[in-house]
């Protein structure tokens, strides 16, 4: 019998290995997917461009993609005028919070200084969908492998998801080598996603792997007797005619701690 108990958990995170409006112009498949999870015809979507230093061009691109399909807004942390008067009230009123890419270390430092991390945890607990590419994907995990400044290194994420994670797995091969070294050294098991792929979690459990381009996917990694075991996960290409969503975690996903 299929285990459907995780479907009663309303907490959802979709972590893009790379993609969405900032990386795949003209290919809205991943963005369509996360908007669809809200169940709203015109959802409230807030963009957090913190990891880019609130780059103006990034905000403009967000509105270009979302203004016609959602009640779109953004939260700035590096401007005197934050664009939102009551941050907590605004974020907790959203249907989808979309976190942009950039520097994971900067993002986490700013959020922790201003209490945004706790507000986002409350949003997650309330069932507001959380998503993002690159740093906007890494931040949700306990162990994140980032390579923004130099070679790949481990950073403590917010720990909403009790796994390790890295993005850009197919386009930055050095991430794989470092991920294997860290798991062999005792880092918790986890996941890695290619550009154009995303891992969708319901609560702490992997629910589905999606892709916006054929061939992109994700892997689950864990320490085995003879080194790191890397299992390719079943992936649904969003451009296919079939819209069936996986009902249970792929069998190769590690068991939640």
Image (spheres, grey):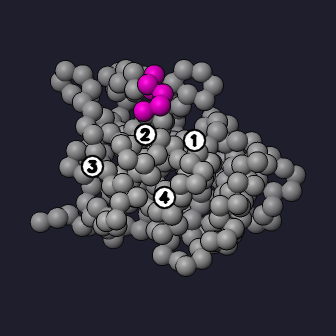
Gap in Å between the C-alphas at discs 3 and 4? 18 Å
Magenta stretch, residue numbers? 170-175
Q: Nearer the viewer, mark 2 or mark 1?
A: 2
- Residue 246 seen: yes
Q: Nearer the viewer, mark 4 or mark 1?
A: 4
Label 4, residues with CA under 10 Å away: few <14, some 14-19, many ≥20: many
Label 1, residues with CA under 10 Å away: few <14, some 14-19, many ≥20: many
Identify the residue position indicated by label 1 in the image: 135
Identify the residue at image location x=32%, y=22%.
Answer: 184
Identify the residue position indicated by label 4 in the image: 29
Direction from residue 98 to residue 86 in the image, left or right: right
Gap in Å between the C-alphas at discs 2 and 3? 13 Å
Q: Quadrant of residue 227?
A: top left
Q: Nearer the viewer, residue 232 or 119?
A: 232
Magenta portion: prevailing SS class: loop
Identify the residue position indicated by label 2 in the image: 194
Residue 146 at x, y percent in the picture: 53, 31
Tag 2 or tag 4, which sits nearer the N-term?
4
Tag 1 or tag 3, which sits nearer the N-term?
1
- CB atoms at circles 2 and 3 under 8 Å apart? no
Number of marks drawn: 4
Report if residue 133 lies within the magenta region.
no
Q: What mark, if any, has residue 234 been given in the picture?
A: 3
Residue lying farthest to the bottom in this orientation: 41
Label 3, residues with CA under 10 Å away: few <14, some 14-19, many ≥20: some
Helix, strand or loop for disc 3: loop
Direction from residue 256 to residue 15 in the image, left or right: right
């Amino acid at each position: 019998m299929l285990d459907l108990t995780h479907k009663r958990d309303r907490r959802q995170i979709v972590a893009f290995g790379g993609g969405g409006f900032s990386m795949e112009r003209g290919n809205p498949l991943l963005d369509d997917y996360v908007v669809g999870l809200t169940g709203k015809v015109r959802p409230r979507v807030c963009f957090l461009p913190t990891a880019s230093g609130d780059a103006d061009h990034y905000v403009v691109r967000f509105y270009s993609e979302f203004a016609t399909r959602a009640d779109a807004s953004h939260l700035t942390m590096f401007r005197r005028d934050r664009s939102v008067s009551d941050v907590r009230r605004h974020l907790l009123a959203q249907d989808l919070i979309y976190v942009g890419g950039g520097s994971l270390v900067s993002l986490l430092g700013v959020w922790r200084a201003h209490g945004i991390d706790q507000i986002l945890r409350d949003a997650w607990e309330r069932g507001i969908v959380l998503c993002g590419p690159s740093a906007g994907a890494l931040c949700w995990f306990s162990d994140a492998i980032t390579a923004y400044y130099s070679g790949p290194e481990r950073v403590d994420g917010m720990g909403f998801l009790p796994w390790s994670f890295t993005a850009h797995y197919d386009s930055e091969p050095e991430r794989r080598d470092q991920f294997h070294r860290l798991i062999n050294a005792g880092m918790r098991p986890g996941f890695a996603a290619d550009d154009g792929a995303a891992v969708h979690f319901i609560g702490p459990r992997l629910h589905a792997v999606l892709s916006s381009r054929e061939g992109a996917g994700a892997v689950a990694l864990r320490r085995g007797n003879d080194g790191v075991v890397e299992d390719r996960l079943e992936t649904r290409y969003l451009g296919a005619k079939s819209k069936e969503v996986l009902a249970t975690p792929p069998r190769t996903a590690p068991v939640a701690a």
